[in-house]
Amino acid sequence: MSAPSSFRTSSILYPVALLLVSMLSIQAGASLAKSLFPAIGATGATALRLGFGTVLLWVVFRPWKMDWRALPWPMLLGYGLSLGTMNTLFYIALQTVPLGLAVALEFTGPLAVAVLGSRRPRDLVWAGLAIAGLLLLVPWPGSQAALDPVGMACALGAGVCWALYILFGQKAGAEHGAQTVALGSTIACVVAVPWGVAHAGMALFTPALLPAALGVAVLSMALPYSLEMMALTRLPARTFGMLMSLEPALGALCGMLLLHEQLRPLQWLAIVAVIAASAGATLGARAPVTAPVPD
């Protein structure tokens, strides 16, 4: 009896480890991208991330093998446009908002999808908890820890785009799976790359920035997307969604360790509220969100 029990334990721990590594990789990539802001700005960093990341995703998922005539192009267009806008807004938010808080604000997007997908009265509690957490972050007049309202608005806007990314992505990838990620990322480049080039100009092509840009692309896109696809095939959807709820906490942790960002107690409480709301909504959702994390 011990062997089957040990096998079941390892079969669960392996995809859980994959997902945790994936989430840590995304947040480490965001931290590395923030180090590029002084040289090329947030939009420039977004352009490099999506540009290099898209090339890597094409190598990993090989979308040229698909029958492009059968693809749901309207859904793919919405998927890619929401991905490009989301990445750009999130990086703009990181200019003035700590990483963990930006992730928590952005997380309201998938949280809203989970709550609306459940349609159970008790899920109003989770929505209320998330709202309470967000109210803790509002830059009230006289607050000693007031956050930049423009940065907060960009993070919330990224959350709206994340919700659209999920809805479009579920339909676009229903029949074609992970390969649609590479195509969606290509469309996202149409949004982000011209914006970044217009802002940063020739600084984007500085050779000294290329190692960091490649690091961001690997950590933020190629590695986590690949690991998440592997975890998705081995984990129940609810377990996947529950683990994804840890994303804001991991973002705050990476912000502390890699960017030396310090959060106040109320800000930590806001992150905990968003995590609890997301976990509760995921448990109650009829169709838990399983789209890859695109931060």
Image (cartoon, helix red, strand yellow):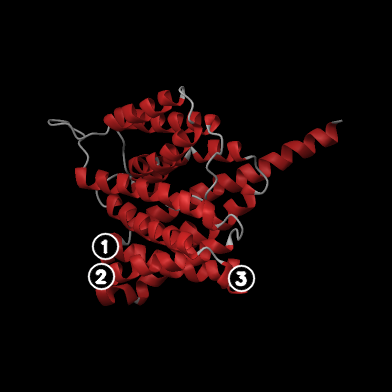
The N terminus appears in which quarter of the rendering?
Answer: top right
In the depicted structure, whether residue 56 falls above or below residue 123? below
- Tag 2 and tag 3, C-beta contact below 8 Å: no
Q: Distance between the residues labelled 1 and 3?
A: 36 Å
Q: Which of marks 2 and 3 is in front?
A: 3
Q: In which quarter of the image is residue 141?
A: top left
| Residue at mark 3 | 66
| Residue at mark 1 | 41
Left or right: 64 as drawn, with respect to 163:
right
- Sequence-wise, the earlier of marks 2 and 1 is 1
Measuring 62% from the left and 48% from the top, which residue is drawn there? 232
Front-most of 247 and 238? 238
- Sequence-wise, the earlier of marks 2 and 3 is 3
| Residue at mark 2 | 200
Measuring 60% from the left and 70% from the top, which residue is drawn there? 62
**Amino acid under disc 1:** Gly
**Amino acid under disc 3:** Met
Q: Distance between the residues labelled 2 and 3?
A: 35 Å
Q: What element carries label 1?
A: helix
Q: Is residue 179 visible?
A: yes
Estimate the x, y position of residue 96 in percent, counting from the top left.
24, 48
Measuring 60% from the left and 40% from the top, which residue is drawn there? 237
